[in-house]
Structures are given as structure tokens and as C-alpha cells.
Image: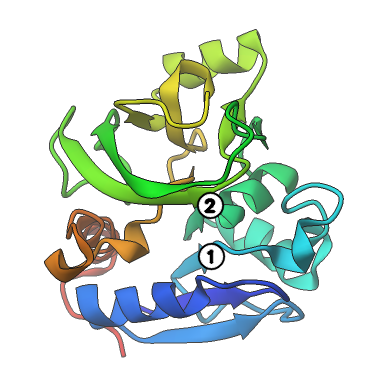
Amino acid sequence: MKFAVLVFPGSNCDIDCYKAVEEAIGEPVDYVWHTATDLSAYDCILVPGGFSYGDYLRCGAISRFAPVMNEVSKVAAEGKYILGICNGFQILTEAGLLPGALLRNTSMKFRCHDTALQVVNNQTPFTNDFDLNEEIVIPIAHGEGNYYCDEETLKQLQQNNQIVFKYKDNPNGSLADIAGICNERGNVVGMMPHPERAVNDLLGSADGKRMFTSILKAWRDTHGTASVR
């Protein structure tokens, strides 16, 4: 299985994502610049956190026009796995790959600390290594992580089991305590907490590691047990 970590001007969690793949599952991983126009060689695309293009206009509003995002939409439609973390989640909503938007935290302050999450959907390729309703600890680091959508969209998210993670103690005012969602197909996930910063107990939690083992398990279930390198 092969991973791509996208890099935009202002990305600052790309190295964390790259190292998390190496440490958690030891699969091949490349940095891919935002000007790339071909992602066909990759099975999973990681859209990392940071401040892409300085977060001018809105978070992710400029990045969604980068050439690589056309390719992200293409491979998402093919069923490949896409994980957007923090700013990556914001980019995926701006690109229309996930519904809703991320607003300023209700505290109007940047929040950076460990956060308890509830695993609401463990049937996605990103969460199959978790138990349903399991409580895990994943850190957050954001100023605009307040998830919002209209009433009809929220109803659809609930009916389609598209809410993947919920905050146990909502740190940013997100609607319905939402910390992460997926598309209807389940192959695109966006979340504000940072699983790549929780892959080793030395970091305070290793709960994020199971997101990466989940991805590999889902891919092997589809493609066979042998790892492609």
C-alpha cells in the first residue's frame, strides 16, 4: 500500500503524517507537492494540517483550487482513501468532498490540548480497528474547528452514519459535538483532531495509531494480505 502526504505552502503537519505512516504501519509514503497532477500511484491520500496559503480568505479556501485537489477529487471518486486532518478537513469541505464548514472556535481562542473522542462509526476504512463507542484520546490544535452545517445536512449525516467521531467535552462549539465525518461512501474522512500526533505512548497517547492500522487492514481486505512496496 502506498501513501501520499500532500504539501501546500504553509502545511506544517506534513512531516508528522509522513512519520506516523512510517512508525504505525511501515508502508511506503511520499510527499506530494500541491502542483501535482497525478495521484494514480497512491492508495491513500493524507491532507495534513497547518495553515495552507496562510489561511487567507478562509481556511482551505485557496488550497481547494490547487491542481492536486482536482486529482484528489478524481481518486476519491474511484474509491481510494482520503483523510483530511485539521486544515486538511477544512480543505476537503471547501472542495466539496465533505459537507459543512469549519468556523471560529466559540471561545475565539486557539485550542491546543489532548481531547477525548467517542468513536461513533467504526465501519469506515479509517476506524475498523476501534470498538463502537470507544473513548480515545487524540490532540487538537486549531482556531477554526467549530463544525457547522445546516439542519438538513445534519439530519443526513445522522441518518447515513456519516458522523465518525464526537467530542466528549466539546472544545470548540461544534454542532452536535462533531469532531469528524465521512462521505456517504465512507472512503473520505475529515477530522479536526490530529491522529498523527498520537501514534506512540511517548506522545501522550497511541490511540491515533489505530487509524493507520485500520487503513492498512481495509486495503488488505480489498487487495489481499501482501503489502505492495
Query: Residue at left 25%, top 34%?
Result: 119
Query: Residue at left 66%, top 42%?
Result: 93
- To which quarter of the image does residue 116 belong? top left
Residue 27 position (above or below residue 173): below
Dot 1 amino acid type? Pro
Query: Residue at left 30%, top 49%?
Result: 138
Dot 2 amino acid type? Cys
C-alpha separation, residue under disc 1 versus residue under disc 2? 7 Å
Q: Position of residue 39 (x, y in %)?
A: 60, 76
- Mark 2 surroundings: few (<14), some (14-19) or many (≥20) residues within 10 A: many
- Mark 1 surroundings: few (<14), some (14-19) or many (≥20) residues within 10 A: many
- Kindly check if marks 1 and 2 are in contact, taking CB atoms under 8 A apart as contact: yes
Residue 48's disc number: 1
Front in this rendered view, residue 168 or 100 = 168
Quarter holding the N terminus is: bottom left
User: Does residue 203 appear to the left or right of 175 in the view shown?
Assistant: left
Kindly tell me whether residue 160 is visible in this rendering.
no
Front in this rendered view, residue 173 or 19 = 173
